[in-house]
Amino acid sequence: MIRLFVSDLDGTLLNENHQLDDRILQSIDFVLDNQCDFAIATGRDMHPLHKKTLDFGARHIYTICMNGAMVFDWYRNIIFEQPIESSFVYELAQTFPDLSFDYNGKLEKYTLASYQDIYARYHAQNFFGGFMNIEQMENWLSDYRYDQSPEDIASQTIYKINGEVDDPKRKAEVHDFLLQHDHQIENAPFRPDFFEITAKGVNKGMAIHQLAQYLHVSDDAVAVYGDGGNDMDMMKAFDHAYAPANASQTIQAYASEILGPNNTYSVPKHMERTIINNKNK
């Protein structure tokens, strides 16, 4: 019997506009009303400002964020956290000052870049026009601390580092740098041209184990849902692992069942169906 449902957000739980809606929230309410627990497992930092763009209301759900570097409850009480070693943070920032990586702390993010550089980056990706209104855009950008030095950033507690590098030569240099420091970090990007760096041993699968132990839930009572590269460890870690049809082929290979595409609410429907099957056993 499944007691803990854990889902990735983008490409999995959320709709095609990367947003929550009433249908998704209805399914979460169904899970909670039937005395089961629900958690999101995301690469997002879920800082308070960013949560305004993804509002679960007062629902008692758990959050696994930054690819497992932090786990907290609905009051933001920390259940688990594992930051990156400050020596690595400093060396990365010092070695690649021209790359506008996001260095994610507990409540805000830090960058060597200027406001103008970050705005231009998101604008070029159609990030804001794609699924954010003006207020949400301002919340997103106000979460940054701009024009930081490597020393400034390394003095903070950093849990996850994000970056996208277009230039093939620079990308190869970053990969080589990470290989030299693989005793300190993990890199589990949701797509190959991206970097998502956490401390060694940190991933969504490990974090879900931490949460399940906290809730006294056995592994065989956990269901996980994912679609991309940063979901790999959790899909491999649990028998009840489900992927929407839009998931990467690699992720689908680890799924116990392939669902419909995420834009058909396949994950909400599957959670509800699982609850109903639980009742009928």
Image (cartoon, helix red, strand yellow):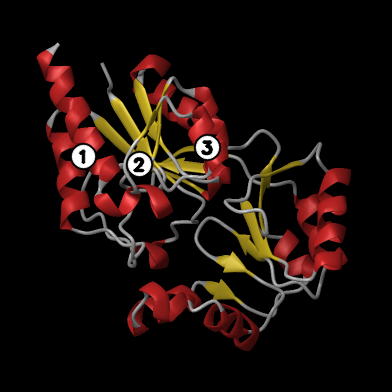
Q: Is residue 50 something one can see in this rendering? A: yes
State the residue in front, 186 or 193.
193
Tell me whether the residue at label 2 lies in contact with that at label 3, contact meaning CB atoms closer than 8 angstroms: no
**Are there few (<14), some (14-19), or many (20+) residues within 10 Å of tag 1?**
some
Which residue position holds label 1? 269
Q: What residue is at 53 percent from the left and 31 percent from the top?
A: 253
Q: Quadrant of residue 146?
A: bottom right
Tell me whether the residue at label 1 lies in contact with that at label 3, contact meaning CB atoms closer than 8 angstroms: no
**Are there few (<14), some (14-19), or many (20+) residues within 10 Å of tag 3?**
many
Mark 3 is on which residue type? Ile
Q: What residue is at 33 percent from the left and 37 percent from the top?
A: 259
Above or below residue 103? Residue 80 is above
State the residue in front, 253 or 131.
253
Residue 159, position as x, y percentages in the image: 61, 50
Q: Which mark is residue 88?
A: none
Q: Which mark is residue 251?
A: 3
**Are there few (<14), some (14-19), or many (20+) residues within 10 Å of tag 2?**
some
Q: Secondary structure at mark 3?
A: helix
Mark 1 is on which residue type? Lys
Residue 12, position as x, y percentages in the image: 38, 47
Which residue position holds label 2? 73
Above or below residue 15? Residue 237 is above
Q: Is residue 164 left or right of residue 45?
A: right
